[in-house]
Amino acid sequence: MCGIVGYIGNKQAYPILIKGLQRLEYRGYDSAGIALINDNDNLNLYKSKGKVADLIHFAEKNDVSGTIGIAHTRWATHGEPNQVNAHPHYSQSEELVIIHNGIIENYAVLKKGLQQHGYTFQSETDTEVLIQLIEFVKKSNNISLSEAVQLALNEVVGAYAIAIIEKGNPNCIVAARKGSPLVIGIGENEYFLASDATPIIEHTNKVIYIDDEDIVTIERNKNLIIKTIANVEKTPEIKELEMTISQLEKNGYPHFMLKEIFEQPQTLANSMKGRVNVDANNITLAGFIDNKERFLNAKRIIITACGTSWHSANIGMYVIEEFARIPVEVEYSSEFRYRNPVIYKDDIVIAISQSGETADTLAAVELAKKEGAFIFGICNVIGSSIPRNSDSGCYTHVGPEIGVASTKAFTAQVTVLTMLALMIGKEKGTISDERYLNIIGELHQIPDKISSILKKNNDISEFAKTFTYAQNFIYLGRGYNFPVALEGALKLKEISYIHAEGYPAAEMKHGPIALISQEMPVVVIATHSSTYDKVISNIQEIKARKGKIISIITEGDDTVRNLSHFAIEVPHTEECLAPLLAVIPLQLLAYHIAVEKGCNVDQPRNLAKSVTVE
Ligand code: G6P
């Protein structure tokens, strides 16, 4: 969703804020804006439709001086992405400006009330309503900005991370959060604020994660003051960031997505580091060990997630049911949270999220927690909201994922779920020692096997060129490879805008087969598995209807190769680990088709990396 960034200190704010916006641009990129207070106490505000580059082009012709400022990159919710709706937004008097990530749900009622007091509105946004409300409260009660923010937020229903500056007060930023992330960076006589730590790490590794319903007053050369919305003062808890700047750069790759695909041998090794021990033949997940009894007594596990994380959740269902013999249900977070689900106190709810901030998944966690279930978070971003709201969990440790289409997060989530399933199964005795040891040995080899698949990148790139004509794609898989088919289809539609459907291969004959013609590329994941022969029959059905078969096969499989228009080999592995290999060529295929079509791979239209609104 939107990215917010702020600075107060002794340096010029503009370059820091612009660099910060560029780091946050993956969160939203339909418009951008910046507000600065210069040394003459002028409040200058610039905004433009489009990307941060468009803002730079526009702003740099003007006065961009000042040592305090706030900036925003937008993913539109209320009102189309144009200059008027871009943030920051002025209050009526133009004395206050705000940036906001989130949604004010009761904005219509608040707006009506403000209109009755003579307030008029320039934009269609909920954000403008909030800053007008803050100004109204401030002026009617003759109180400070932070007091006004506190009173106003008590009237607000919805989610927000906000930052506000005030003309005539060049020494203070007031910020607050509820439901949308906000991090404060602490430098030498300077403070940074941002939606996540990526704009902060190049300046300082000391951060404070702001909690929901907290308001922070950041004053130049003074200590931070954090108060709750109910006016209770809190002691800030300073944390140290582990991130490095090189993780935020493309390091010679043309796109973050390609870099992240190629990082997977290393990121999976990181996910397994200290957890999969081949010499000792065991797996250790601290989040499991500390809560062993909960897992062993669980009658049911519910996995909740969105997007790509929902696909890894489905693989989690297969692997946990197979090895731990606990029934698993997989739920889209957005459905789960609103359908009054039955949740028992001895249920375990696993929430999977790369960002740890997805609003629907966070709400699902809160609901399940209220019902007394045990929450286990599988997330990537350290210190994000879902891990902080979970009882226990496991980080995936893949480093920042910046390409909007998720790649390395997916393989790491599947790896963590597999490790968890194996640990539960071992403790429960529902997996044989031999099987357990074989899978540990295979897991250990997965990074090298992925490296060998990545060597086929040039071939896949060449072959992808033949498919830029396609308007539709079908992806088929069975068993563990069915969620991989869903993920392959999602990758393609996200970044190339080609319509793609993932289906269980055997379901094809109940509908999608009507779509097959010689125009239709059909990607079939046909690696060796317990359903291999059945998948061959499904391939024959497509071939009989002249569909173009692109297959993902196990090395040396001439049977499927001979049935295919194009076949990509992956090394042999255990059936439950096949998704970790089969998804790699699908990521590359989607990437190269999108590049060939001239699409913006890292920032596809209409999407955002971290969806902090429902
Ligand atoms: C957005 C992203 C997807 C991601 C989904 C869930 O839609 O574009 O790539 O899979 O959110 O995100 P999460 O951070 O919860 O895994």
Image (cartoon, grey):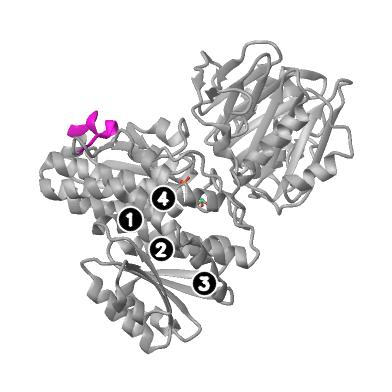
Q: Nearer the viewer, mark 2 or mark 3?
A: 3
For residue 486, which numbered disc appears in the image?
Answer: 2
Q: What is the quadrant of residue 542 in the picture?
A: bottom left
Q: Earlier in the sequence, mark 4 or mark 2?
A: 4
Q: Nearer the viewer, residue 365 or 379?
A: 379
Q: Amino acid at mark 4?
A: Phe
Q: Amino acid at mark 2?
A: Leu
Disc 2 and disc 1 in contact, CB within 8 angstroms: yes
Percent coordinates x, y for residue 31 in the rendering: 72, 48
Taking 436 as reference, is 409 left or right? right
Q: Earlier in the sequence, mark 3 or mark 1?
A: 1
Disc 3 target residue: 463
Q: Nearer the viewer, residue 175 or 254?
A: 254
Q: Amino acid at mark 1?
A: Asn
Disc 4 target residue: 410
Disc 1 target residue: 314
Label 2 to label 1: alpha-carbon separation = 10 Å
